[in-house]
Image: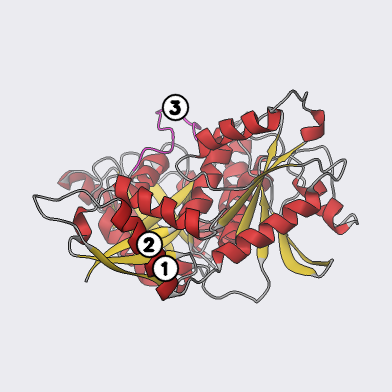
Amino acid sequence: MGFTIAIVGRPNVGKSTFFNRLLEQRKAIVDDTSGVTRDRQYGIAEWAGKTFNVIDTGGFVPNSEDIFETEIRKQVKIAIEEANALFFMVDVTTGITDLDASMADLLRRTTKPVFLCVNKVDNSERLLEANEFYSLGIENVFFVSSISGSGTGEILDAVAELITPEASEDNIEKSELPKFAIMGQPNVGKSSLLNALIGQERTIVSEIAGTTRDTIHTHYNLFNKEFILIDTAGIRKKTKVNEDLEFYSVIRAIKAMDEADVCLLVLDASKGITAQDVNIFGLAAKKGKGIVVLVNKWDLVDKETNTARNYEKQLKEKMAPFTDVPVLFISVAEKTRIFKAMEVALEVYENKTRKIATSQLNEVMLKAVEDYHAPVVRGNQVKIKYITQLPTAVPSFAFFTNYPDDIKMPYKNYLENQLRQHFNFTGVPIRIFFRKK
């Protein structure tokens, strides 16, 4: 399983800025009004060769003070349950507030590692003031400045020590059966798909978004095909049902993704692919998962000639650069092509586990290199002498060359396209490495 860190703290202490620091990109919306983070923000951070999931817990806009406090407490409780470690953020400029103290009280009781991040410590005077936070009774205290980034290295070093190489790789150890995770926005028909496949009401299907709270594993064995289906809680944009229950559905979806071999991304035909779907798609590709896109409720769409073809073209424009992905148009209500979808998922699983003989790989790919040479570097000819597939969970190939650092993205893309043309890797991300011979 992967390793997940949740950032908790009362509103406006700088959680999102810190989150952006960790991801080295501006992914969360940062703004000075309380409660801007309503979306669960999540991403993958990398440090000291270890990879982990980071989740930024939301502020929210409460109706009254007391609800505010109880809601935040609920969020912290869920975070404690779901994450592997917690970053508890406080703000040196305000000192310890009652809300900080009551959160610290919850966090002291957990056996999970808690890192207290005292934020906005950007001069020596504030460093002195920051010492009062030791009184919260949390062992690991770090002084950071989210804006300048000072102190983040130390806290990340401490976290990296907790992460085992297995958790970082997250999917090496697997049971023998392929695992498929059903993902997508609320109400696109994920649970209905599961029920239609199994032919029984295994999960409760209802019209309220957010009925499936937890991931559900179903062992599927029909027509001589055997695999495990993981139905994830709807990954959602804004709150519709109780904030706290939805609060960590994203962690659960990411956990399911960590566990799965292939992600079935279910879309609603009338809505197309949303920004959140693209986000999930990118996360799955980054994690090296197989992907199948299922466009549900296709029976409700007005068809004209080539509708499906044009629709698929538009989808792939948004999924670029990784477009070698199967897209199926299904209707769960009418049970159209849902079994076909499982067959395709099994094919993608086979593609993901495919090993190509070194002799065959060299025969095909060296010819591709001959047909189109890598651009000359500083007057030197780039030569690729030998190719081998690495023994990893994601299809990865090492190209041995005299100038490994000088091969640019366009040529790398050319090699990936050649691999895809000659060997079937549909639905699977490919990794290419250049190494010194």
Q: Earlier in the sequence, mark 3 or mark 2?
A: 3
Q: Is residue 287 visible?
A: no
Looking at the picture, which amino acid does disc 3 mark? Answer: Thr
Q: Are marks 3 and 2 in contact (CB under 8 Å)?
A: no
Q: Which residue is mark 1?
A: 361
Indicate the quadrant containing the C terminus: top left, top right, bottom left or bottom right: bottom left
Q: Nearer the viewer, mark 3 or mark 2?
A: 2
Identify the element where label 2 is drawn. Answer: helix
Compared with residue 179, is residue 71 higher up or lower down, i.e. above or below? above
Identify the element where label 1 is drawn. Answer: helix
* Image x and y of residue 112, in percent: 50, 67
Q: Nearer the viewer, residue 384 or 32?
A: 384
Q: Earlier in the sequence, mark 3 or mark 1?
A: 3
Q: Are marks 1 and 2 in contact (CB under 8 Å)?
A: yes
* Image x and y of residue 353, in percent: 55, 69
Q: Residues within 10 Å of mark 3 (few under 14, many from 20)?
A: few
Looking at the picture, which amino acid does disc 2 mark? Answer: Met
Q: Residues within 10 Å of mark 2 (few under 14, many from 20)?
A: some
Q: Residues within 10 Å of mark 1 (few under 14, many from 20)?
A: many
* Image x and y of residue 316, in percent: 54, 37
Residue occupying the point 46% across, 47% down: 9
Identify the element where label 3 is drawn. Answer: loop
Looking at the picture, which amino acid does disc 1 mark? Answer: Leu
Q: Please, what is the dominant secondary structure of the magenta stretch?
A: loop
Instruction: Report the disc number at residue 365.
Output: 2
Q: Nearer the viewer, residue 426 or 291?
A: 426
Indicate the quadrant containing the N terminus: top left, top right, bottom left or bottom right: bottom right
Residue occupying the point 82% across, 33% down: 299
Which range of residues does the magenta coloring cover?
A: 25-38
Instruction: Report the disc number at residue 119.
Output: none
Q: Which residue is mark 3?
A: 33
